[in-house]
């Protein structure tokens, strides 16, 4: 029986994102479906890399799987305010803690 990669623990952080109150240093626009998917994708990428997975095919398969599994959380993310520069921070983050605290909880 082969070991199946467990869902990234960091995906619980997406739940946090979905429940964030509007932040004080916010931009005028709200998170789009594409931005929310990008946040999830980055979390998946960071977590799989941390677990030692480097296969781009596996990464894409997990992205698709987890987007489906966390559809409600993705939907809840849409429309949330993000501070200026949040998405650039998400793209640069090299660990989940940084992504959550520095990128999404910026005050």
Image (cartoon, rainbow, N blue to C red):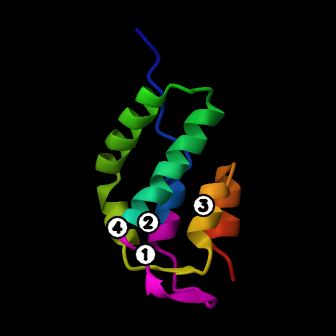
Q: Residue at x 47, y 62 (%)?
A: 15
Seen from the viewer's position, the closer of residues 52 and 1 is 52
In the rendered image, residue 37, in percent from the top left (x then y), is placed at 40, 58
**Circle number at residue 59:** none
Q: Is residue 9 left or right of residue 94?
A: left
The residue labelled by disc 3 is 90
Q: Secondary structure at mark 4?
A: helix
The residue labelled by disc 2 is 35
The residue labelled by disc 4 is 33
Which badge, 3 or 2, is on the more N-terminal residue? 2
Which badge, 4 or 3, is on the more N-terminal residue? 4
Q: Is residue 31 magenta?
A: yes
The extreme top residue here reads 1
Residues at discs 1 and 2 in contact (Cβ within 8 Å): yes
Q: Is residue 7 magenta?
A: no
In the rendered image, residue 97, in percent from the top left (x then y), is placed at 69, 56
Q: State the extent of the magenta-drawn residues as a range.
A: 16-33
CA–CA distance in space, label 1 to label 3: 13 Å
Q: Secondary structure at mark 2?
A: helix
């Amino acid at each position: 029986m082969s070991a199946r990669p467990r869902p990234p623990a960091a995906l619980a952080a997406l739940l946090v994102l979905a429940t964030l109150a509007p932040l004080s240093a916010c931009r005028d626009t709200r998170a789009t479906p594409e931005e929310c998917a990008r946040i999830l994708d980055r979390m998946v990428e960071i977590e799989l890399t941390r677990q030692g997975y480097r296969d781009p095919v596996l990464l894409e398969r997990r992205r698709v799987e987890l987007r489906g599994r966390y559809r409600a959380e993705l939907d809840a993310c849409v429309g949330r305010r993000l501070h200026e520069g949040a998405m650039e921070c998400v793209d640069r983050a090299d660990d989940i803690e940084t992504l959550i605290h520095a990128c999404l909880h910026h005050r």
